């Protein structure tokens, strides 16, 4: 089927801006009055494209990042746009030891998990981690992106216990929203997946926050290019299975 209603969930304005520009989207000022989340909408070759971002703290001007804001943003986006598919686009950390490079684009496959939801009660561990299956991104194979499990946690840094859990879970990408977005989409039975641009290599020995800021522009430019290729593929390909 041809996809004609796509919603992107993106945490930070800096991650969304190049995508908004690429699709010439316009802000929908009627989106969730009184809440910080913001939305931009438009059309690409007959396909409705919308973006919802978490918005900023009115006190300190910083983006709301993380799972709490992502959960609310995803729910609001679904209520407003009823998309056929949700794409969580953003940046992520990755591992040089697993072959990653800064600026590369990854698609989530076959699932996303929480790496810092540790509940050591019999039977509860996998429940806490989530293990949310994503939409079958193998259908986008010809676009040439890399693939991997995205693991989500609430911190930018990586403590030794986080690293241990990420490795046990087979994680290739480390972010702060993916599992929350995919969880909410699954509650609504909407197919969803992630596209992530690598800003930092968490095993490089360099401070992650420095690498993140240094590479943000490069990574988000690549991210916008990647999102464009994905939308074009989904919009034109009549054989996509949701
Ligand atoms: N987003 C970008 N880099 C990240 C990292 N290293 N950890 C979590 N989220 C990120």
Image (cartoon, grey):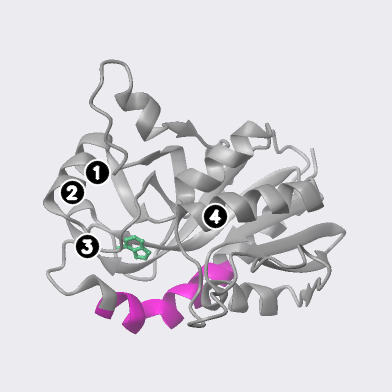
Residue wearing tag 3? 202
Q: Is mark 1 within 8 Å of ligand 1?
A: no
In the rendered image, the vertical position of residue 212 relative to residue 146, given as above or below? below
Q: Is residue 56 visible?
A: yes
Q: In which of the image's four quarters is ligand 1 placed? A: bottom left
CB of mark 3 within 8 Å of CB of mark 4?
Answer: no
**Residue 70 - label:** 4
Residue at horizontal 61%, vertical 52%?
72
Name the residue rendered at 39%, 39% in the picture.
Answer: 113
Magenta highlight range: 210-225
What separation in Å lies between label 1 and label 2 (alpha carbons)? 5 Å
Dot 3 beta carbon under 8 Å from ligand 1: yes
**Cα distance, mark 2 to mark 3?**
9 Å
> Percent x, y for residue 21?
68, 80
Within-10-Å neighbours for mark 3: few <14, some 14–19, many 20+: many
Camera-side mark, 3 or 4: 4
Crowd class of label 2 (few under 14; some 14 to 19; many from 20; radius 10 Å):
some
Quarter of the image where one finds residue 114: top left
């Amino acid at each position: 089927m041809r996809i004609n209603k796509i919603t992107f969930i993106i945490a930070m304005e800096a991650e969304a801006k190049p995508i908004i520009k690429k699709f010439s989207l316009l802000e929908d000022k009627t989106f969730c009055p009184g809440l910080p989340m913001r939305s931009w909408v438009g059309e690409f070759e007959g396909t409705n494209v919308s973006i919802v971002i978490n918005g900023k703290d009115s006190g300190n001007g910083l983006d709301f990042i993380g799972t709490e804001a992502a959960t609310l943003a995803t729910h609001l986006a679904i209520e407003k746009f009823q998309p056929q598919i949700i794409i969580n686009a953003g940046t992520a950390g990755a591992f040089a030891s697993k072959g990653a490079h800064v600026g590369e684009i990854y698609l989530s496959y076959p699932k996303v998990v929480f790496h810092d939801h540790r509940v050591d009660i019999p039977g509860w561990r996998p429940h806490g981690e989530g293990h949310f299956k994503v939409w079958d991104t193998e259908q986008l194979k010809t676009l040439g992106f890399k693939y991997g499990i995205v693991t989500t946690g609430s911190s930018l840094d990586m403590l030794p216990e986080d690293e241990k859990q990420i490795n046990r879970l087979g994680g290739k990408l480390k972010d702060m929203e993916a599992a929350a977005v995919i969880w909410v989409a699954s509650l609504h039975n909407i197919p969803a997946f992630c596209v992530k641009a690598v800003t930092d290599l968490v095993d490089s020995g360099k401070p992650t926050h420095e690498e993140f800021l240094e590479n943000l522009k490069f990574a988000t430019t690549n991210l916008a290019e990647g999102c464009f290729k994905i939308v074009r593929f989904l919009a034109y390909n009549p054989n996509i299975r949701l």
